[in-house]
Amino acid sequence: MSDDQIPDDSKLTTSKRRWAAEGKFLTGRISRPETERLPPGQHLVKNWPVLDLGQQPIISIDSWRLEVGGLVETPLDLNWAAFQALEQSATVSDIHCVTTWSRYDNKWKGVSTRDLLDLAMPKAEAGYVMLTSYDGYTTNLPLSDFAAEDAILATAWEGLPLTRDHGGPMRLVVPHLYFWKSAKWLRRIDLLPADKAGFWEKNGYHMYGDPWREQRYSED
């Protein structure tokens, strides 16, 4: 499913396009991670809100696959058993959603993005990543951010398997960027020579998405 096939008439999708056009939630306040834990314009929640594009794909473990391609020396096509056989990691991180909620101390288990990249071996000219999900969603980020120390391809949260509404059976988690960059239901990872806009980036959201710089929306 391509970007133009993603349902675009859901209430959330329409609202978020309007927020981008209006610059909603921007505070203009400068905050620094070394002095504050909560980025500007955010508020803490204890639950985990569910946000998506209006559909939640049903993905059986038997049919699940993850492909890694583009500028890599060793393209990967992993089924669930092969993915689970990779070295497993655990991490704890905060998450920050562009819709202004943040949640502290989330416990994740899964495969470190660095361990996956060690298998795929990015080529020297690779500088960016495009993520494609089972629902057709796409998002982009620099390869260096995808390979952050605490970035993880998560299959469990708080000691339990990741549920479908939160991106199960596997999603990306890149804690230092707004959470729209952490694609749910991840299906494919492509390494690219140059940056390329994904779904929300084409619809008014920032190409990078640093919560501490309040990069919610496009600079254009």
Image: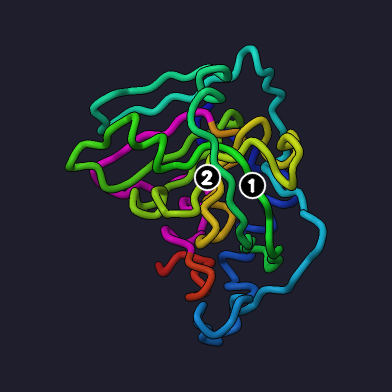
Mark 1 residue crowding within 10 angstroms, few (<14) / some (14–19) / many (20+): many
Q: Do labels 2 and 1 touch, CB within 8 Å? A: yes
Q: Is residue 14 left or right of residue 128?
A: right
Q: Main secondary structure of the magenta part?
A: loop
Residue kind at label 1, given as amino acid type: Trp
Q: Residue at x 48, y 67 (%)?
A: 210
Q: Which residue is mark 2?
A: 152
- Count of numbered tags: 2
Residue kind at label 2, given as amino acid type: Ile
Q: Secondary structure at mark 1?
A: strand
Look at the image and give the residue range highlighted in magenta. 187-209
Residue 164, above or below 64:
below
Q: Which residue is mark 1?
A: 108
Residue 102 appears at what percent x and percent y?
69, 66
Q: Is residue 20 magenta?
A: no
Q: Residue at x 51, y 77 (%)?
A: 33
Q: Secondary structure at mark 2?
A: strand
